[in-house]
Amino acid sequence: MTEPVDDDHAHRILLDHADRKVTGPLEDPAVLAAVVGVERLVVATGSTDEAVLRSALTGDVVADADPDRVAALVAEARSHVMAGLLRRATGQAVDAGIVNPASGGYEITTDATLLRAAVRAAQGSIDAMPYYGARYGARGSRFATTDSAWLVSLATLAEDRAVHQVEWLSRVLAARGMPSWLLEIHLDALVSEVRSVADSGAVGSLPVAADALGRARRRHVDDDLLRSADSWADEVLGDALPVPRAGALMAAAVADERAGVTRDDRALVDWLTDSARSDESATARLLGVRQRILDEAR
């Protein structure tokens, strides 16, 4: 008998996996989508309690959680599980396209424990840096999730190969306005999450890859300059900041330009100074901070 591919069936699968107990390789695309959907709710609700997660899935208000965000994540999770059910019915492979249709379908980890760690690292990094949401919205969140699930699969590679792959991704993202410092932060979070749920060897080559990004940045913009850039931007703009941590973001973009990761920092600076979020006075002050960073960077 053919299984139904509808919202009710997807909802039942999500509820079945609210206990977060499934382990090992996830060969069923609908189950993989459910694991990702539930783990995104873990970050949004701040809870791993099954009862809390089931409440979120059934539309009940969860204390200390943004109800609009939770509702959006639940709706998206149901959609992704339905996509997984279609794949199940047609025997299609498991890849990033299940939970990120715009991804093109690249390889991601199918290990349930590592996948959850990857989701938490991605969503936690996004929550810590409001720039992601302001600029890239829900699409950025989906890509962060699948990129993280791809990154964790690099752990088993030789160190030089893992570093090469991470450096390639850093160039792609930096060209789209995400300085490689953000990927550095994401990798640190990913290493921490994996270490919290798996043996010490599970992180493999990931710490080396994160260190490679950090060393490349610090040759031009060290941690002190990142902090100083934030202070300068806060001092001269205050509430007129287009996004929190704009100073550090500009400093990180300068580091990428100096390191040859990008040709220039326009992908970031043009967005920060766009008239939609920065008037002429604020733009002039932002560019003044940028010039100060350029003067201090090596």
Image: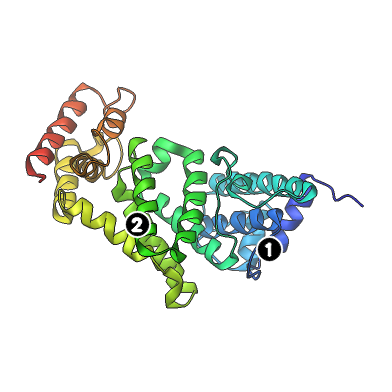
Quarter occupied by residue 203:
bottom left
Q: Height in image: 225 above or below 139?
A: below
Tag 2 or tag 1, which sits nearer the N-term? Answer: 1
Q: Height in image: 239 above or below 221?
A: above
Residue 251, x across and y down, in percent = 20, 43
Looking at this view, name the residue that lies furthest to the right: 1
Q: Residues within 10 Å of mark 2 (few under 14, many from 20)?
A: many
Q: Residues within 10 Å of mark 1 (few under 14, many from 20)?
A: many
Q: Is residue 258 left or right of residue 158?
A: left
Q: Which mark is residue 163?
A: 2
Q: Is residue 72 left or right of residue 234?
A: right
Q: Nearer the viewer, residue 203 or 40?
A: 203
Type of amino acid under label 2: Val
- The answer to whether residue 27 shows anywhere in this view is yes
Number of numbered discs visible in the structure rendering = 2
Q: Which residue is denoted by mark 1 in the rendering?
A: 17
Q: Nearer the viewer, residue 114 or 206?
A: 206
Q: Say which of marks 1 and 2 sits in front.
A: 2
Local secondary structure at mark 1: loop
Residue 237, x across and y down, in percent = 19, 36
Type of amino acid under label 1: His
Looking at this view, name the residue that lies furthest to the bottom: 199
